[in-house]
């Protein structure tokens, strides 16, 4: 079982790049299931109905998210596509949407996806560690293949959750910082781990935003509206191979490419 996870989409150009590269990526890496984090797809805040439909049509099996998915202008998208579009499970009860889902593949195998959000330097929401354990116990009654997208700021919190879920989840992959880390590994009890999968979006930027706007915001310390940067769009992703019998990861590989490089190297 090979899962492709594509890191945080920033802007519509990132959606375009996924549509362009996904067929080739799936063929090259023999992908069985594709997950995309799409919480920044629409101008940095949430995702639109049109973007969801485009990702579905090009073969994305599940879209995860994070703290920006709650944009009130796109609330209906989260409601309509609950179960395909996930939000972090550990927000308080009563919030719309779903934080986990199980998907049956054409092969008959099932893949579970769990979306969580960290608390360090973020929001005081429910404990991701306790909720993850409880939810994974439920999901394991359906499948041993469990992928966790942990949307968090602090590397220490991400690493702690990776160790906490080693032997329970197949993969714990960090998102949110938009910078791909180089610490991919298989933990001792079989969980694939990466602190941050990175960003699919404009790299000549400050985590996807126009550099001049970001600099002004830091210098002036007052509210400045961010704008999505343009051009030089790169795709960051990770491929994880999992033993479908026991749910343990056997291989993890990072991807960092753009359209020109990908088609030149094929």
Image (cartoon, rainbow, N blue to C red):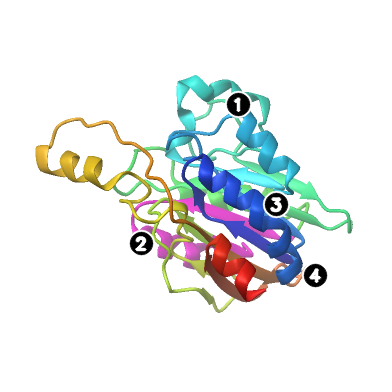
In the displayed structure, would residue 235 be above or below residue 92? below
Is 66 on the left-hand or right-hand side of 55? left
Mark linked to residue 77: 1
Mark 2 vs mark 1, foreground winner is 1
Using the numbered discs, state the Cα–Cα distance from disc 4 to disc 2 in whole angstroms. 30 Å
Dot 4 and dot 2 residues touching (CB under 8 Å): no
Magenta stretch, residue numbers: 144-172
Residue 130 image position (x, y, % from top left): 50, 49
Using the numbered discs, state the Cα–Cα distance from disc 1 to disc 3 in whole angstroms. 21 Å
Q: Nearer the viewer, residue 56 or 229?
A: 229
Mark linked to residue 262: none
Residue 173 image position (x, y, % from top left): 52, 60
Element under label 1?
helix
Q: Residues within 10 Å of mark 2 (few under 14, many from 20)?
A: some
- Which residue is disc 4 drawn over? 245
Dot 2 and dot 1 residues touching (CB under 8 Å): no
- Which residue is disc 2 drawn over? 155
Is 226 on the left-hand or right-hand side of 20? left
Q: Is residue 201 visible?
A: yes
Using the numbered discs, state the Cα–Cα distance from disc 3 to disc 4 in whole angstroms. 14 Å
Dot 1 and dot 4 residues touching (CB under 8 Å): no
Q: Earlier in the sequence, mark 3 or mark 2?
A: 3
Q: Earlier in the sequence, mark 3 or mark 4?
A: 3
Using the numbered discs, state the Cα–Cα distance from disc 2 to disc 1 in whole angstroms. 30 Å
Mark 4 vs mark 2, foreground winner is 2
Tell me, yes or no, whether the highlighted magenta stretch contains residue 151: yes
Using the numbered discs, state the Cα–Cα distance from disc 3 to disc 2 in whole angstroms. 24 Å
Residue 33 image position (x, y, % from top left): 73, 57
């Amino acid at each position: 079982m090979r899962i492709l996870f594509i890191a945080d989409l920033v802007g519509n150009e990132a959606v375009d790049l996924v549509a362009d590269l996904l067929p080739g990526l799936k063929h090259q890496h023999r992908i069985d299931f594709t997950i995309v984090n799409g919480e920044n797809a629409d101008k940095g805040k949430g995702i639109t109905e049109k973007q969801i439909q485009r990702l579905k049509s090009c073969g994305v099996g599940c879209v995860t998210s994070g703290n920006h998915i709650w944009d009130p202008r796109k609330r209906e998208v989260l409601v309509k596509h609950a179960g395909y579009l996930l939000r972090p499970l550990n927000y308080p009860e009563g919030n719309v949407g779903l934080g986990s889902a199980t998907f049956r593949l054409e092969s008959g195998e099932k893949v579970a996806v769990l979306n969580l959000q960290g608390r360090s330097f973020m929001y005081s929401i429910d404990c991701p560690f306790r909720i993850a354990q409880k939810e994974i116990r439920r999901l394991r009654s359906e499948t041993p293949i469990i992928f966790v997208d942990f949307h968090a700021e602090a590397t220490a919190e991400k690493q702690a959750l990776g160790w906490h879920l080693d032997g329970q989840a197949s993969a714990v992959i960090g998102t949110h910082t938009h910078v791909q880390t180089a610490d991919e590994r298989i933990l001792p009890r079989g969980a694939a781990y990466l602190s941050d999968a990175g960003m699919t979006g404009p790299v000549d930027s400050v985590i996807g935003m126009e550099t001049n706007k970001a600099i002004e915001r830091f210098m002036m310390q007052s509210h400045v509206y961010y704008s999505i940067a343009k051009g030089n769009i790169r795709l960051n992703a990770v491929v994880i191979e999992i033993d479908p019998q026991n749910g343990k990861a056997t291989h993890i590989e990072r991807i960092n490419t753009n359209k020109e490089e990908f088609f030149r190297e094929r």
